[in-house]
Image (cartoon, rainbow, N blue to C red):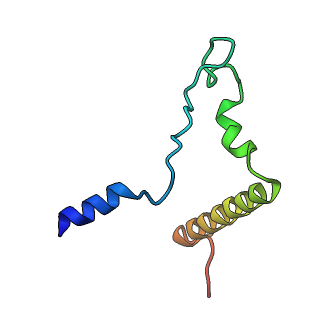
Amino acid sequence: MLDNLRDDADASPLYEDDGLPDFLEVDMGGRDRRTNDSSGFLKPILDLSPLQRFIIAVMLFMTVCLIGSMLLLVTQRLAIF
């Protein structure tokens, strides 16, 4: 029974595997693509659409407000009642 399941799984893949792109590929100049751009660490953020960046900024703002209010409550600088 398990052999039949294995054969079925090997025979018909659910998707066509085209292979993953090589992210560490060397560019045409012979240098590594990660080191030739000074703002390479910002690329994942800069590739987002403006709406996605806005949502991330709002979520970050809300997180800072929440942590700040919790800190004020814990240090008793702000009282609820």
Q: Quadrant of the C terminus?
A: bottom right
> Whole-percent x and y of residue 17?
49, 47
Q: Residue at x 57, y 24 (%)?
A: 25
Q: Quadrant of the N terminus?
A: bottom left
Instruction: Return the residue found at the far right.
Output: 50
State left or right for residue 72 relative to residue 19. right
Residue 13 sits in which quadrant? Answer: bottom left
Vertical placement of 67 versus 35: above or below?
Answer: below
- Residue placed most toward the observer, 28 or 37: 28
- Residue placed most toward the observer, 12 or 60: 12
Q: Residue at x 62, y 83 (%)?
A: 80
State left or right for residue 43 relative to residue 50. left
Q: Residue at x 69, y 38 (%)?
A: 43
> Whole-percent x and y of residue 16?
51, 51
Vertical placement of 30 versus 60: above or below?
Answer: above
- Counting every numbered tag in the picture gives 0
Residue 3 sits in which quadrant? Answer: bottom left
> Whole-percent x and y of residue 23?
57, 32
Vertical placement of 17 versus 13: above or below?
Answer: above
> Whole-percent x and y of residue 24?
55, 27
- Residue placed most toward the observer, 21 or 69: 21
